[in-house]
Amino acid sequence: MAHFIDRRLNSKGKSTVNRQRFLRRYKKQIKGSVADAIGQRSVTDVDSGESITIPKRDVSEPVFHTGKGGVRDMVHPGNDQFTRGDRIERPEDNEGGGGSGQGDASDQGEGQDEFSFQISKDEYLDLLFDDLELPNLKKTQYNKVVQYETYRAGYQTDGNPANLDIVRSLKGSVARRIALTAGKKRAIKEAQQKIAAFKADTHEHPIEIAALELEIEALQQRIKRVPFIDTFDLRFKNYDKRPIPTSKAVMFCLMDVSGSMDQATKEVAKRFYILLYLFLTRNYKDVDVVYIRHHTQAKEVDEQEFFYSQETGGTIVSSALKLMDQIVQERYDSQEWNIYAAQASDGDNWADDSPTCGELLRKALLPYTRYYAYIEITTRSHQSLWREYESVAQSNGNFAMKHIQDPQDIFPIFRELFKKEQAKQTEG
């Protein structure tokens, strides 16, 4: 059995294999550093790499060395200040160790520099979304009813004449004719050059010229016998069928953009949604994302408008819930789609509208929603919407609500909302 060791260097001059081994070994410490860093990032740079710092003591390696052995005679100098058993007092504050630096010395004993290194975007996102998933994701189609879609699967040398790819076949014909005739054409050119040289000579060479002309004629006949197109050149388009994914999901992102949401609060909400978008697009291939902004009225928008529009107004939260229900009824059959929702708000709402929101959730949205996450971003006391949603959460297991006070809370809350069930049981 042969073993192959990849010793190619990456751009940093280190072995890629060793780098991945390092990331696996210190995964716990690196994940902690990533979690601390996410709260400090702006809206636009969540999907870039990160400079990670972990304590140097966590990356120290065991060292083997030869211990002292045998019998030794040693002479230790004595002193005239201390005797065995004396207790030495700690120096007074600001007396330090008498070094040449400008600051004061520490009284906490020895210290170590922290170990810093750079991780790539992919490594950063892998660590960021480790152990996360969409809760309650289920197959939404019957096992016996499997739909297939036809897709292009390259080319084949035989098939239906209707699937003949003329351009591809002609390219193959040209390549074949060049390969079969290039040497003969080169020989004809060399023979013609020799004939020209003989004719330019002062002596006559009729026999040599006749032989070369016969050779040229024979080569030209062989070139003509090469067919313009052969069955070997034919290429037919190949089509195959693949099953349509049985687990389709859609995520509704509902964001409050009313006047009570100041810029700092909107910034926190955007960070949460960008984190959610990266998680969905990186971990799942077949997830639709629907963006809804609302104040007194709700509107479905694209990604650009959702994150950067400056529109504002009053607050009627139920308008967003009604629009979500309308979109589901029109485009996302709950029998075929896993439906998720994430709502961000500062909790401010018309008092008379909060009971309407609770009613819409209980009777319209939660019966077909796999998971509904509500985050409230505020440093004030909770208002009527939070209290109404608390009663919804008590009677519906697929409804979760969390409170975010500052940017440092975003990632821990995000992990709590989307942590894998197995990881939750392990922690419990």
Image (tube, rainbow, N blue to C red):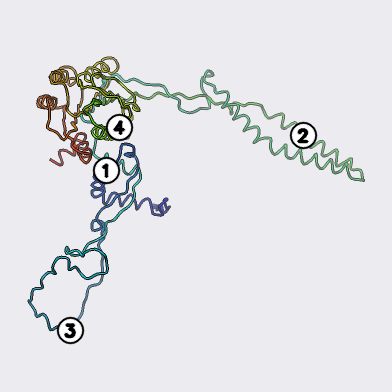
Q: Disc 4 or disc 2, which is closer to the eye?
A: 4
x then y, percent, for residue 111: 22, 62
**Cα distance between the residues tagged 2 and 3:** 108 Å
**Total numbered circles:** 4
Q: Which residue does the image show at 19% across and 31% down from the upper left?
A: 375
Assign a secondary structure to mark 1. loop
- The earlier-in-sequence mark between 3 and 4 is 3
Front residue of 307/71: it is 307
Give amino acid for label 4: Tyr
- The quarter holding residue 422 reads top left
- The earlier-in-sequence mark between 2 and 1 is 1
Q: Which residue is mark 1?
A: 40
Disc ID at residue 208 = none
Give amino acid for label 1: Gln
Q: Which residue is mark 2?
A: 218
- The earlier-in-sequence mark between 2 and 3 is 3
- The quarter holding residue 389 reads top left
Q: Is residue 195 above or below residue 144?
A: below
Disc ID at residue 277 = 4
Q: Disc 2 or disc 3, which is closer to the eye?
A: 3
